[in-house]
């Protein structure tokens, strides 16, 4: 069976390399063997590392709970790239390394709070990675950077603590979130750091009232930002990220918090 599939994989591989991604995508419509082989052949070529698809999604600022074919393809590729270590000859992707670091922090916390067998830990790691990649996808679709942000080199500082706080908020790890906030008193849960939405947005978007109140306890009642800054250049216990998350969720109870 593997021998019969190999020519199909080679055809798709050379079409992707020679014809480009957009035209190669049409090969999925040719026949069932092409469709079944497409993703496992596409991902190792790493052509999606340089793909710029942001203009297709800049209007998708409102977080609709729909995952079309392109969304699922990108999600699966993020999972693939986070699992596959880059070769020394390849440029490192900042988001893949950061995702692995965040995931390692979550797994260490998970092991600390409950003893598990090795198989259970491996299964939890895979499940966490799948879910984290959906958080990244949703953040790209509704964030200011746009979808193409993952394909760019992140030149700003890598605040791993803030990214881990966002991930801990999503999974409802209150004690880990409290530890991170205690370790760095300057950490601002209203900010986002590249990959994920702000912890305040995620808490409201996922309907976690306890997590939102925990984060609100580290914020002032209201604080103006720098003069002549962005339009939403302020922070408080009310938002602005938590208001956005609650509105996208359509939850008036979260808005009232």
Image (cartoon, helix red, strand yellow):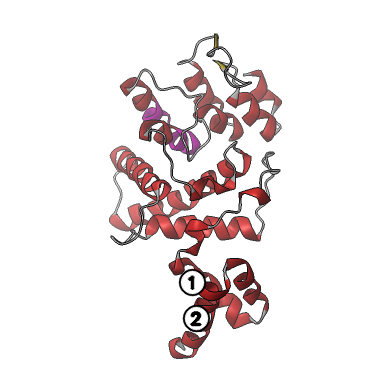
> Which residue range is magenta in the image?
166-177
Q: Residue at x 66, y 22 (%)?
A: 255
- x and y, in percent, of residue 32 in the image: 63, 81
Q: Is residue 31 above or below residue 134?
A: below
Identify which residue, 255 or 52, lies in the foreground: 52
The answer to if 5 sits in the magenta stretch is no
Residue at 44% of width from left, 86% of height from top?
2
Dominant secondary structure, magenta: helix
Q: Which residue is mark 2?
A: 9
Q: Secondary structure at mark 2?
A: helix
Q: Indicate the quadrant where residue 24 lies.
A: bottom right
Does 120 sit above or below residue 64?
Answer: below
Residue under the point 49% across and 90% down: 4
**Residue 132, image x, y percentages:** 48, 46
Q: Nearer the viewer, residue 130 or 172?
A: 130
The residue that mark 1 highlights is 40
Residue contact at pointers 1 and 2, CB within 8 angstroms: yes
Judge left or right: residue 166 versus residue 184.
right
Instruction: Say few, some or many: other residues with alpha carbon within 10 Å of mark 2 (under 14 / 14 to 19 / 20 or more).
Output: many
């Amino acid at each position: 069976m593997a021998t019969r599939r190999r020519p199909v994989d080679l055809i798709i591989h050379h079409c992707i390399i020679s014809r480009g991604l957009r035209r190669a995508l049409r090969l999925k419509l040719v026949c069932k063997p092409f469709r079944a082989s497409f993703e496992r052949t596409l991902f190792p070529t790493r052509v999606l590392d340089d793909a710029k698809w942001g203009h297709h999604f800049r209007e998708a600022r409102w977080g609709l709970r729909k995952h079309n074919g392109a969304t699922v393809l990108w999600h699966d590729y993020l999972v693939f790239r986070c699992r596959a270590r880059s070769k020394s000859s390849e440029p490192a992707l900042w988001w893949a390394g950061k995702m692995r670091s965040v995931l390692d922090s979550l797994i260490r916390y998970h092991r600390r709070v409950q003893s598990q067998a090795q198989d259970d830990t491996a299964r939890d790691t895979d499940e966490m990675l799948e879910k984290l990649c959906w958080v990244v996808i949703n953040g790209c679709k509704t964030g200011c950077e746009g979808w193409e942000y993952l394909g760019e080199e992140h030149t700003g500082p890598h605040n791993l603590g803030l990214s881990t706080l966002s991930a801990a908020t999503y999974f409802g790890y209150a004690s880990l979130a409290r530890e991170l906030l205690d370790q760095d008193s300057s950490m601002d849960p209203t900010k986002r750091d590249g990959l994920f939405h702000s912890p305040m947005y995620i808490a409201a978007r996922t309907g976690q009232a306890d997590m939102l109140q925990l984060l609100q306890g580290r914020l002032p009642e209201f604080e103006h930002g720098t003069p002549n800054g962005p339009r939403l250049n302020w922070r408080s216990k009310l938002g602005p990220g938590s208001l956005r998350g609650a509105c996208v969720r359509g939850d008036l109870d979260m808005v009232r918090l």
